[in-house]
C-alpha cells in the first residue's frame, strides 16, 4: 500500500497534482495498491475514491529529497524506524511497498516518469461532465484563445513573479487573431492588459471554485503564457497548448532575469 497522508494540505492545487499523480504512478507501475485522502481534485475530476481510512496509519514515512525541513513528526518517529529520508530516484530504482510518501514529487526522476507516461496520467484527469459541459457552453464562440496565467500574491512576496511586461512583450507575437483569456489573482492585471481586450468566463449553473474555471481555461487554450507555477505547468501538461514560461522552480538563482521561453511541460 502506497499513500500520501498529507495530500490536500501540503501546497495548493498544482502541488497536489504532482503528489497525486506521482504516488499513483509509482504504485501502479510497480504493482502496489494505493490509497489517498480527499483533495482538491476530487471536486472537479472523475477520480476513483481510494481513500485510506485507518489502513495507512501505521505505514512508515519516507521524506523525499525535495522536502528538506525537519519537523516534529520526524523527530518523534525517526527513533522508532517510522520516518526516514529518501528520494524518488532511489525508490524507482529499488521499489518499496507499504510506505507513506512526504514531499513535493517535483524532482527530476518524478518529472521524467510523468513525461514518459503522459498519456496514462492525462487519462486520469477527466473533468466531471457537469463542469466540462458548462464551460464548453460558456466559451462557445470564443475558441481558440491564448491564456495568460499571471500569478502575483505569494510569488511577488517570494521574489519569483514574472513582470507583467514580459507577458505583454511576447503576447503580440503569439496571439495572431485569437482571443485572450487572463487568469490572475490580481484584479489590476486585467486593466494592465486592457489593450488586448481579454474576455472573462462566467458560466451559469456551475458548482465549481473559481480556480477550477481558470484551470479548465488554461488546459483548453491554444497557447499559455505563464509564470512558471505548478498550476499552469499542469494545465499545459494535460492539454496541448504551446507553453511559454520560465523554469518550474521554487527559487530562482541570484541575478536571474525571468523570460517566457517555449518549453515542453
Image: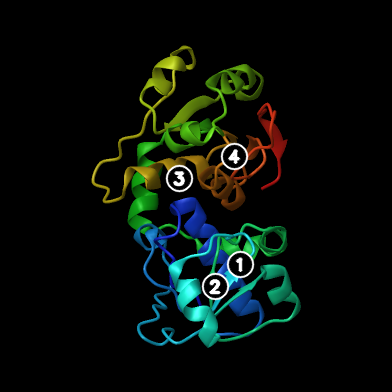
Residue under label 1: 64
Q: Residues within 10 Å of mark 3 (few under 14, many from 20)?
A: many
Mark pair 2, 3: CA separation: 26 Å
Q: Which mark is residue 215?
A: 3
Element at label 1: strand
Task: Estimate the x, y position of residue 46 in percent, counting from the top left.
Answer: 41, 65
Question: In the image, which is nearer the foreground, mark 2 or mark 3?
Answer: 2
Question: In the image, which is nearer the foreground, mark 3 or mark 4?
Answer: 4
Task: Estimate the x, y position of residue 150 in percent, counting from the top left.
Answer: 49, 31
Query: Is label 1 in contact with label 2 (beta carbons under 8 Å)?
Result: yes
> Above or below — where is 103 with respect to 231?
below
Residue under label 4: 228
Mark pair 1, 2: CA separation: 7 Å
Residue under label 2: 101
User: Disc 2 or 3, which lies upstream in sequence?
Assistant: 2
User: Disc 4 or 1, which lies upstream in sequence?
Assistant: 1
Indicate the quadrant where residue 118 lies: bottom right
Q: Residue at x 56, y 23 (%)?
A: 163
Viewer-nearest residue: 98 or 62: 62
Viewer-nearest residue: 23 or 138: 23
The answer to whether residue 246 of the structure is visible from this angle is: yes
User: Disc 3 or 4, which lies upstream in sequence?
Assistant: 3
Q: Residue at x 72, y 73 (%)?
A: 90
Mark pair 4, 1: CA separation: 22 Å
Task: Estimate the x, y position of residue 121 in percent, counting from the top left.
Answer: 59, 64
Amino acid at each position: 500500500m502506497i499513500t500520501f497522508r498529507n495530500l490536500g494540505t501540503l501546497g495548493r492545487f498544482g502541488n497536489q497534482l504532482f503528489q497525486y499523480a506521482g504516488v499513483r504512478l509509482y504504485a501502479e507501475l510497480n504493482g502496489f495498491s494505493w490509497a489517498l485522502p480527499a483533495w482538491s481534485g476530487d471536486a472537479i475530476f472523475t477520480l476513483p475514491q481510494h481513500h485510506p481510512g485507518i489502513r495507512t496509519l501505521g505505514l512508515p514515512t519516507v521524506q523525499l529529497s525535495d522536502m528538506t525541513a525537519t519537523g516534529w513528526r520526524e523527530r518523534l518517529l525517526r527513533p522508532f524506524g517510522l520516518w526516514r529520508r529518501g528520494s524518488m530516484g532511489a525508490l524507482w530504482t529499488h521499489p518499496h511497498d507499504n510506505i507513506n510518501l512526504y514531499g513535493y514529487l517535483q524532482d527530476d526522476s518524478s518529472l521524467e516518469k510523468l513525461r514518459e507516461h503522459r498519456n496514462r496520467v492525462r487519462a486520469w484527469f477527466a473533468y466531471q461532465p457537469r463542469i466540462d459541459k458548462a464551460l464548453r457552453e460558456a466559451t462557445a464562440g470564443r475558441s481558440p484563445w491564448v491564456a495568460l496565467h499571471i500569478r502575483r500574491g505569494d510569488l511577488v512576496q517570494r521574489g519569483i513573479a514574472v513582470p507583467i511586461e514580459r507577458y505583454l512583450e511576447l503576447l503580440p507575437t503569439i496571439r495572431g487573431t485569437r482571443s485572450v483569456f487572463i487568469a490572475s489573482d490580481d484584479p489590476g492585471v486585467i486593466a494592465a492588459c486592457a489593450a488586448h481586450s481579454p474576455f472573462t468566463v462566467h458560466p451559469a449553473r456551475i458548482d465549481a471554485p473559481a480556480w477550477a474555471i481558470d484551470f479548465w481555461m488554461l488546459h483548453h487554450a491554444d497557447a499559455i503564457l505563464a509564470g512558471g507555477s505548478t498550476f499552469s505547468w499542469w494545465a499545459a501538461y494535460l492539454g496541448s497548448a504551446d507553453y511559454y514560461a520560465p523554469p518550474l522552480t521554487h527559487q530562482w538563482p541570484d541575478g536571474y532575469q525571468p523570460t517566457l521561453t517555449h518549453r515542453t511541460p
